[in-house]
Amino acid sequence: MEFGFPQYSDDVANPIDKLKDTRDRRILNTTALFFESVRLATFYYFKYREELDVKKMAKKGFYYSRLTDSVVCYFCNEKIQFGGNYEEETSSHAIDEDEKCPMARFPLNGNVPIIDPHSVDNDSYSKLNWMLQDFMAHNVRNDIPNKGKKIIFNPNIVKEDALKETFVLGTNRLSTFDQFLKYLPEEIRPKKNRYAEAGFVYTGFSDIVMCFECKGGLFNLHVEDDPIKDHATFFGHCPFIKEYVEKHKVDVKLQYQNVLKPFKEQDKKLLMHHPMVKNLLFQGYKKSDIKNIVEKHVELFGHFPFDIRIFKKEM
């Protein structure tokens, strides 16, 4: 089974094992941090990105959180504070299967490692991870609408009361930004009121914001970014931004790119090669039930869950 290697635009996380000098700006959702390539892209603003091995950090499950200016494991929330011993703490993280971090159970988790197209192995698991990376990057690049997609907030940052309100109101969207990058000087801090006005809410993960209406996501934000223009350019199908641009006579061209990437039969067959699937088969679950649940989950989220028990609950 052969897979071609796609070309990536400058603002979509690239699976090649390096940190680019240009900003990746679009993100599918907060769970895209399951992808090593996306975690690597979050280190764009990390102060020590040139001195330390950020590739190793991303590989071990860590991403750079601009919220707290710290390096955080996405899978267990272990935090390396600014100025900590990054190398030592990264090396000792998730090396024992008895540890609480799901990364210690890899590949029985949802982590999607970087697959280098120049040295991709012939085994089905490597092809599966490349397919997941390709699928995610295509959906981000072409902004595929997904009616089932939900915004996953960090419950420790975004208050529960805020989530009960309707985000149609700009004041409610703004309330999600209460903890937004407060340590940054005002002159270099992205303007939260501008993002709220543009339809975005803050997720509580790093600096990831998402539109309440279309669920389009942005990260690696800069103070000089124009959220209205970015929203219209990257997520031109969004009803909210279309109405906003028309009402306020904003001089920006709405971009439409929605080219659906089909989830082919060969892709579905590859899903059955994931270690989670093999584990479920070994435990006696029916292949047809596993197939249906896995396909549904991956089509909705773009990756496997961090814990096999999530699949078990659905069967």
Image: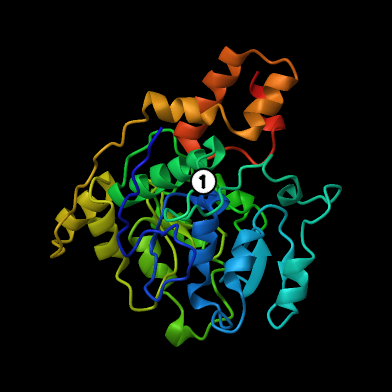
Where residue 3 sits, quadrant-wise, is top left
Determine which residue is flagged by label 1.
Answer: 121
Q: Residue at x 40, y 61 (%)?
A: 196
Mark 1 neighbour class, 10 Å CA radius: few under 14, some 14 to 19, many 20 or more: few
Q: Residue at x 46, y 45 (%)?
A: 130
In the displayed structure, 80 sits above or below 255; it is below
Answer left or right for 123 relative to 263. Answer: right
Q: In this rendering, does residue 207 appear at all? A: no
Q: What amino acid is at disc 1?
A: Asp
Secondary structure of the residue carrying tag 1 is: loop
Q: Position of residue 44 (x, y in %)?
A: 48, 74
Answer left or right for 40 relative to 258. Answer: right
Q: Residue at x 84, y 53 (%)?
A: 96
Q: Position of residue 270 (x, y in %)?
A: 49, 30
Q: Residue at x 23, y 55 (%)?
A: 244
Q: Position of residue 74 (x, y in %)?
A: 64, 56
In the displayed structure, 187 sits above or below 206; it is below
Quadrant showing the N terminus: top left
Q: Which residue occupies the foreground of this view, 181 or 279?
A: 279
